[in-house]
């Protein structure tokens, strides 16, 4: 009887403790949630309303003279057929090539540097880690100004190329695409009618395939240079969590260095790889300060990005609704690509055919 009467008290007591812990947790997180709500959620909701309105930038966006225009601002930059659509298509093309080249290059370079400085036989590993990481902690504005000097017509990069007999381009004043330049080198100067005659977002498919401009290529090199050190540290943390016994087992099975890296090390770095790719994807689609400091979209709008176009549309052209609409379209693009990337890098179940390779089979004669 005693056990039966005291059991409910224990349940009630434990549930009361849990309720108290939950209340304490909400109490401690309330200041942060309040700050995020006031300075993050509320401005985002206000910007969302601006993207559906004709607010001119004067007065409150919630005043009575501000009208709801629905999807007009989104239509202007996606299907309007005018300069706004063409600029948005150009910005997406430029940023798309930027993402397509920066994310793989910085991921591969950061992983290579992590494997290199994680080797026990390397002397002065701390010095190398600091040297590789140093560009990541330097101001992006300072790096951009330095890059403008290095890649100028008479800068150090063209000087080094001249030693090899190469006449370097005027980097930040050359709007030509590197793919078109490569095709022109083999005699192809114009595309087929199927590519030049049809357009998407006001830009012909031939121009979509032009590749990044020479000016944008300099920004691509700068992004790889400045971000690889940060992602290198993430890969180092992942490598140090891999047990040495796994590598030793692979060596006992006769796996060489490349096989151990491809079959053992890289699969265990999947969580870190997903983090690096996600951060790289988000960061490259949001590139703004380098463009603002360096070229402001030039030459010929070949370094224009959606983030800078959103700023220029709102703050320079006073098209606040279109600027907010561009920002939210960019947000949707980032979310969709992040979800797609997560689906590609998801954990997949082992197939039956591969599982059979690891099954322990009894001898044909049975156990004697």
Image (cartoon, rainbow, N blue to C red):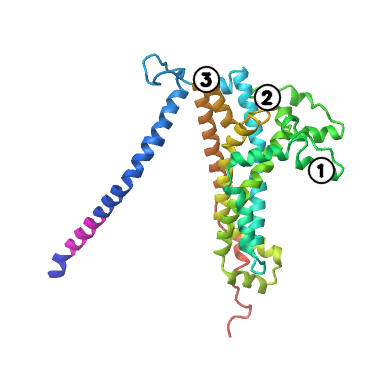
Residue 185, how many percent across, how many down?
85, 34
Q: In this view, does 61 lie to the left or right of 28?
A: right
- Element type where label 1 sits in the image: helix
Mark 1 or mark 3, which is nearer to you? 1
Pointer 1 and pointer 2: residues touching (CB < 8 Å)?
A: no
Identify residue for label 2: 203
In front: 336, or 207? 207
Q: Mark 1 points at which residue?
A: 161
Q: In this view, does 19 lie to the left or right of 163?
A: left
Task: Give the farthest residue toward the left.
Answer: 1
Q: Is mark 2 on a helix, strand or loop?
A: strand
User: Where is residue 75 shown, x and y percent of the image?
Assistant: 54, 21
Q: Distance between the residues labelled 1 and 2?
A: 33 Å
Residues rendered magenta in the picture: 7-18
Q: Looking at the image, is 121 positioned above or below residue 304? A: below
Residue in the picture at 66% in, 57% down:
113
Q: Residue furthest bottom?
A: 368
Real-space Cα separation, disc 2 to disc 3, in angstroms? 22 Å
- Residue that label 3 marks: 319
x then y, percent, for residue 97? 67, 36
**Does residue 8 belong to the magenta stretch?**
yes
Q: Do the residues labelled 1 and 3 touch (CB within 8 Å)?
A: no
In this rendering, the label closer to the viewer, 2 or 3: 3
């Amino acid at each position: 009887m005693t056990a039966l009467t005291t059991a409910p008290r224990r349940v009630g007591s434990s549930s009361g403790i849990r309720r108290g812990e939950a209340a304490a947790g909400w109490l401690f997180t309330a200041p942060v949630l309040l700050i995020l709500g006031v300075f993050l959620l509320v401005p985002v909701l206000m910007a969302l309303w601006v993207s559906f309105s004709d607010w001119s930038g004067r007065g409150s966006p919630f005043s009575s003279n501000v009208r709801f225009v629905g999807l007009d601002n989104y239509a202007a930059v996606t299907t309007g057929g005018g300069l706004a659509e063409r600029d948005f298509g150009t910005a997406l093309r430029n940023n798309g090539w930027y993402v397509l080249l920066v994310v793989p290059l910085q991921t591969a370079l950061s992983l290579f540097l992590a494997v290199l400085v994680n080797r026990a036989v390397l002397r002065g590993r701390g010095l190398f880690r600091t040297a590789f990481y140093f560009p990541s902690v330097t101001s992006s504005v300072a790096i951009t100004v330095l890059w403008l000097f290095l890649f100028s017509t008479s800068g150090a990069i063209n000087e080094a190329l001249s030693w090899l007999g190469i006449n370097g381009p005027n980097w930040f004043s050359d709007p030509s695409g590197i793919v078109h330049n490569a095709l022109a080198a083999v005699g192809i100067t114009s595309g087929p009618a199927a590519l030049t005659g049809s357009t998407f977002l006001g830009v012909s498919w031939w121009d979509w395939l032009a590749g990044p401009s020479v000016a944008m290529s300099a920004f691509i090199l700068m992004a790889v240079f400045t971000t690889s050190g940060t992602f290198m540290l993430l890969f180092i943390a992942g490598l140090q969590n891999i047990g040495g016994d796994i590598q030793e087992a692979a060596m006992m099975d006769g796996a060489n260095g490349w096989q151990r890296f491809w079959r053992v090390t890289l699969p265990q770095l999947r969580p870190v790889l997903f983090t690096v790719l996600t951060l790289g994807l988000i960061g490259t689609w949001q590139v703004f300060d380098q463009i603002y400091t360096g070229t402001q979209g030039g030459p010929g709008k070949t370094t224009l990005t959606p983030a800078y176009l959103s700023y220029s549309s709102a703050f320079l052209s006073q098209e606040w609704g279109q600027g907010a609409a561009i920002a939210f379209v960019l947000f949707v693009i980032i979310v969709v690509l992040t979800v797609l990337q997560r689906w590609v890098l998801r954990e997949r179940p082992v197939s039956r055919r591969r599982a059979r390779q690891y099954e322990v089979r009894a001898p044909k004669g049975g156990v004697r």
